[in-house]
Image (cartoon, rainbow, N blue to C red):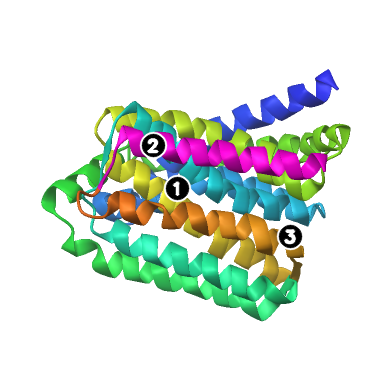
Amino acid sequence: MLEVWGFFALGLVLLALGGDSIVKGASGLAQKLGASPFVAGLLLVAFGTSLPELFVNARAYFVGAQDLALGNAVGSNIVNVGLTLALAAIAAPLLVRTRLLSHLLVLLTLSTLAVILFGLDGVISRVEGIVLLLAFVAILAYLLARSGRELPEVRESMASYAVTRSVLWMNVLRFLVASALLYFGARFVVQSAPMIGASWGWSPLLVGLLPVAIGTALPEVAAAIAAARRGQGDMVVGHVIGSSLFNLLVVVGGMAALRPMPLPASFVKLELPAAIAFVLVLYPMLRGDLRISRNEGIILLLAFAGWVALELLLISN
């Protein structure tokens, strides 16, 4: 069992290293192909941190561990708000200046509701999966169309986030090496996580929901805390909302588009509503002062701890 834990930990390390490198490589390639630093930074802030989860879920899906992938996709959304955002706000209050984030928060709420509605009959069909994918394309187009209305200081901050070396061969090499790290990291995590869950008597869905979702989020938690201390609240909140949208629309939508995805009734009644509850609680926090305080971060963290305790309690019964 010690060997299994070793592979799980190694997989998480490789995912962290690959995720950081592939973001830098993608930024350099995007700018080399003509994207402005601001646009590159905006897309990286919104969706760049989802790539490790994408590799894990893709690996899980193609080896037949669809429940693990589903649990990780939705569990990651709860972890994004209840752990990543909470700890970042506790480290330093988060000030949000990017106007687009309020729009994306509404779209995240609607996306989560759509997944719940699609899953009421116990399955997300291929057509519904395609609808989710098309919704992501529409959101991406909307994001790019509205990006020019941002404040100059926000544009400068986003552009500085995307600054990296623009030498083509270096970014291609960085991208390829990062892809290999993500591939093997995902392979080790997906290979070892079900064994760990089986030793505890957990289902693959629950393994994806808790240990895998929390484990893959740890590097993002560290990065979010560092960004909060630098006063980059937009980066932290943008990562959380964008990553959550990506998980629902691209990961869940993509899996369903390839093959109809069964959803357990308990998942539709508990985990998905929990995901939307964590999103909705951000509205009163950001309303007015556009700021998430330390006390509000503590509230989010306590809510997350309560959710984990509830999941563990349900397992034991």
Binning the other alpha carbons within 10 Å of mark 1 as few (below 14), some (14 to 19) or many (20 upward) gives many
Point out the residue furthest to the bottom here. Answer: 127
Mark 2 to mark 3 CA distance (whole Å): 28 Å
Quarter placement of the N terminus: top right
Q: Is residue 248 magenta?
A: no
Which residues are the magenta region?
291-317
The residue identified by callout 2 is 297
- Residue under the point 75% across and 65% down: 265
Mark 1 to mark 3 CA distance (whole Å): 31 Å
> Cβ–Cβ below 8 Å for labels 1 and 3?
no
The residue identified by callout 3 is 266
Residue 48: mark in rendering: 1
Q: Kindly identify the amino acid type of the residue bearing the numbered disc 1.
A: Gly
Q: Kindly identify the amino acid type of the residue bearing the numbered disc 3.
A: Ser
- Residue under the point 82% across and 55% down: 64
Looking at the image, residue 154 sits to the left or right of residue 311; the answer is: left
